[in-house]
Amino acid sequence: MKKPCFAPADILLPKKEIPLEKWACVACDQFTSAPAYWEKARAAAAGSPTALDLILPEVYLGAPDKDARVAAIHAAMQQDKNEVLTRQVHGFVYVERTEQSGRIRQGLVGALDLEDYSYELGVLPPIRPSESTVVARIPPRLAVRRGASLETPHVMMLADDPEKTLIEPIAAQKGTLQKLYEGELMLGGGHIAGWAVEDTAQIEAIETALAALGTQAAFDAKYPAAAGHPPMTLAVGDGNHSLATAKAYWEELKKTLTPAQRETHPARWCLAEVCNVHSPAIEIEPIHRAFFGTDIQSVLLALTAYSDEHALGLRVGPGGQTIRLMDGKNDYELTFHTPAAPLTVGTVESFVELYLHDHPEVSVDYIHDEPALRGLCAKGAVGILLPPFAKSDLFKGVVLGGVLPRKTFSMGHAEEKRYYLECRCITNE
């Protein structure tokens, strides 16, 4: 029998006496232009073991002491594995995350089989990226993965499960599960609770539901335009490059292993949380663009020239693919009336890549919230605000188009990203 692409795992948790609000921290790819946030996180975690010691926030990727930071991370992993992560679950963790809206996001934490995932264009495995993977973004993350004895996930996967067969049945049984943790997350992260799913029957039910979602018949029924193509079971919702890094490391490592070792080595799997895209608590939001080192007139002139060259029909006002171009003083509503891509983000990202190529002195950051973008514009950035992104576009885009344009969407606000909490060993030591 083929192994499931999402499986139970040996999941590690910190000692009960460690405060949740000090241990857990937000995903490393958030607040990439806000070092003050990470300084506040350090202050909030002071005096306690913290998952901050196990990650490299991407705001520091270009720091001159990056290598020392990576070495410190590896040392902290060894120490925490021996002294802090004293609780273990063999199975899944059922998670309830209360969002700012009050809605509860349900998920299952388990292990993705990296043999069932690929970020290569044209490859159609059961686990697929939802956005283009920028291979150049993998090496800095690989430096952390190499030499790491632990992983802690912010990867969130999505299942297209309209009948609610995978996660919701476990949620209905949570009264029978052992509660592992509950409390508030640091710096406005909201409330979270987790339960152990270790019962054999419950684990088998999860694996049966997952297998049913990945059948050819289920795939053909949901996506008739792609009928007969290799079926997809899960798509990446968040943490695309973190999962790609785990894959790159596994491909590197498995060359040194025997076939028998490849079957069981813990680095073959990557810890992640799976959610149902049909849950009302899953919000798919656009990711905006912020330019640094330029001004709004330069960007506007380049946008106009880009539109004229490709006959995109850029005009002021609404009507087609509408964006807002802004700085600290100006806010223009602009529309591509004859766009080149099916999604607004595709049209915009093609322009961004061209603009950066023609203006090497300019940099861009990808911003998850409108208030954050406007805050950066008030400090001198030039922003492109993208329109809302429909959930229905996500799976159709992945199935029919291969992947969505890079940095298409975000699952919720920055503070609602997955916080590092559970851990797993990725070495045999």
Image (tube, rainbow, N blue to C red):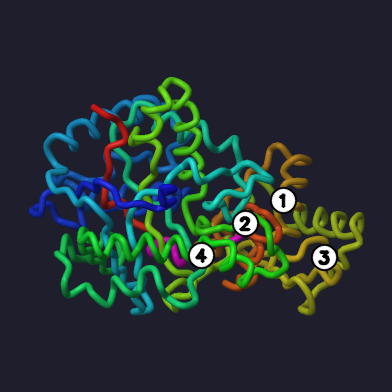
> Whole-percent x and y of residue 103?
36, 78
- Image coordinates for residue 82, horizontal then vertical, percent: 14, 34
Above or below for 66 versus 325:
above
Tell which circle, 2 or 1, labels the residue nearer the N-terminal end: 2
Tell me how far mark 3 sits from mark 1, CA to CA: 15 Å
Q: Looking at the picture, how far across and down is residue 66, in whole percent?
A: 40, 29
**Which secondary structure, mark 3?**
loop
What distance separates the C-alpha of mark 4 from that of mark 1?
19 Å
Amino acid type of the residue that numbered disc 4 sits on in the rendered structure: Asp
Q: Point out the tag, 3 or 1, that comes first from the N-terminus.
A: 3
Contact, CB < 8 Å: mark 3 with mark 4?
no
Question: Toward which corner of the image does residue 254 lie, by quadrant?
Answer: top left
CA separation, marks 3 and 4?
24 Å
The residue tagged 2 is: 289
- The residue located at (38%, 28%) in the rendering is 260
- The residue that label 3 is drawn on is 339
Q: CA distance from mark 3 to mark 2?
A: 18 Å
Q: Earlier in the sequence, mark 4 or mark 1?
A: 1
